[in-house]
Amino acid sequence: MTPVFALATSLMWGLADFGGGLLTRRMPALTVVLVSQLLAVGALGTIVVATGGWSEAGPQLWWAVAAGVVGPAAMLAFYRALALGPMGVVSPLGALGGVAVPVGVGLVLGERPGLLQFAGIAVAVAGVVLASGPGLGGAPVQRQTLVLTLVAAFGFGSVMALIAEASHTLTGLFLALFVQRLCNVVVGGGALWLSVRRGTAALPAGGWSALRSALPALAFVGLADVAANGTYSVAAHHGPVTVAAVLASLYPVVTALAARGVLRERLRTVQAAGAGLALVGTVLLATG
């Protein structure tokens, strides 16, 4: 169960990142984040009401609140780091954070993967780094860029660990994801308001009509991200968090393959090698 749900997480996160990347070419990144999360809140609210998820309310929802606050902050730090420094350095470090924090939590809690799974973790982590396309030219990285990247990496990993603790039943999971997304909207809305106050445009070049035409794509991004959080939570509860975290963090491979298929972007040799290593690591984790 764990490998299946964790790989589904990678697929959906990878496609969500690809869709979000395309949308941010046409509209501000904060607008993409806020609108996609608003649409996700609407869908999750409907599911919570239909399933009676409110009955699962309890102290564990504070984990979801924490994930909802940390997530947008991590994404904003990540975008800022991408703007300041070489993407080939920022991207793999950000993706690797999604592995390091949950794996560390799992080890602290006493999880001990088998030998093949340890090998799979090592190989898959290497694949994540290479598939993200690290730069090999030795471009200098400013201290601010490095700090922002590490903050984002820790945030991404923390969200994965927090959402796994926020619920232990399916209906509770829907409620936890609803609370998380609601907090995302509050934090993202505040950030967008501050950005507009500073003179940054909130709407794309085409105004409201362009935003309305992008709603289906924005809904896909928001719902795919929510679904990925849900499948990750299921994966973490059906097996070792260490395995779930590594397999769920293979999403850079999906994003690269989507870019290759849709945008005809060619994978560099290092990215193709990373994709191969990630697949080998997946097999080792699944069979270990």
Image: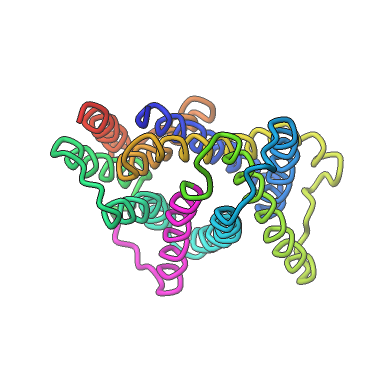
**Residue at x-position 82% and y-position 37%:** 212
Q: Is residue 153 left or right of residue 46?
A: left
Image: 262 above or below 23:
above
From the image, give the main secondary structure of the stretch colored magenta.
helix
Q: What colouring style does the render use?
A: rainbow
Please tell me how many numbered marks the rendered image carries.
Answer: 0
Image: 139 above or below 168:
below
Q: Nearer the viewer, residue 196 or 39?
A: 39
Image: 58 above or below 124:
below
Residue 246 rendering spot, x and y as whole percentages: 33, 42
The stretch in magenta equals 137-163
Residue 149 part of the magenta-drawn span? yes
Q: Is residue 236 left or right of residue 107?
A: right
Residue furthest toward the left?
115
Residue furthest toward the bottom?
143
Q: Nearer the viewer, residue 75 or 5?
A: 5
Residue 168 rendering spot, x and y as whole percentages: 50, 41
Quadrant location of residue 62?
Answer: bottom right
Residue 193 rendering spot, x and y as whole percentages: 77, 64
Residue 215 part of the magenta-drawn span? no
Q: Is residue 77 left or right of residue 187?
A: left
**Residue at x-position 35% and y-position 37%:** 247
Q: Nearer the viewer, residue 167 or 187?
A: 167
Residue 14 rendering spot, x and y as whole percentages: 48, 36
**Residue at x-position 25% and y-position 52%:** 110
- Quadrant where the image shows the N terminus: top left
Q: Nearer the viewer, residue 181 or 22?
A: 181
**Residue at x-position 73% and y-position 39%:** 45
- Quadrant where the image shows the C terminus: top left
